[in-house]
Amino acid sequence: QVRLAESGGGLVQPGGSLRLSCASSGIAYSFNTMGWYRQAPGKQRELVADIDSGGKTHYADFVKGRFTISRDNAKNTISLQMDRLKPEDTAVYYCNARIETLSRHESDCWGQGTQVTISS
């Protein structure tokens, strides 16, 4: 069973930076696309950025030019460098991994989330 654990959230002033990390444990046949989602109070969970095993990235328009996603395929980990943070970036950030299990089934894995708060 694959487990994901996020770290790096916290309270930052507007214009500041944070770096989120997502560590994985457990075994899968493959880790495919991995990404970051966020959910603000009263809103639906939304995609922030994702990256496939080949390194191709995709960003939501609201973070383009400010956030950078990266991946370590050897460790099946991802990170999210967040710069020029805005109050509207306040949310719980979740790590996601689409994996192929050892029995060759596709599965979506989620971390528990880490709180990011942007406030002066």
Image: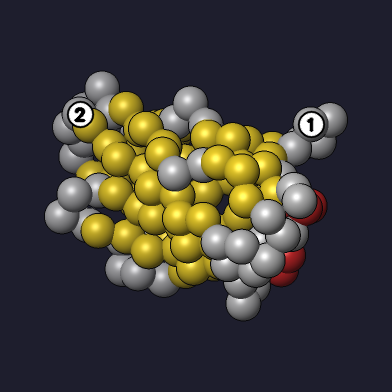
x and y, in percent, of residue 27 in the image? 17, 32
Front residue of 57/22: it is 22
Q: Is residue 107 above or below residue 48?
A: above
Give the alpha-carbon distance from disc 2 to disc 1, as whole Å. 31 Å
Q: Nearer the viewer, mark 2 or mark 1?
A: 1
Kindly identify which numbered label has been placed on residue 26: 2
- Check if mark 2's residue and mark 1's residue have beta carbons within 8 Å: no
x and y, in percent, of residue 56 in the image? 41, 71
Front residue of 25/8: it is 8
Q: Is residue 65 above or below residue 27?
A: below
Between discs 2 and 1, the one toward the N terminus: 2
Which residue ends up furthest to the right in the rendered image? 42
Q: Residue at x 22, y 32 (%)?
A: 25
Q: Amino acid at mark 1?
A: Pro
Residue of label 1: 41
Q: How is the structure coloured here? A: secondary structure
Q: Residue at x 47, y 62 (%)?
A: 81
Secondary-structure class at tag 1 = loop
x and y, in percent, of residue 106 in the image? 37, 35
The quarter of the picture where the N terminus appears is: top left
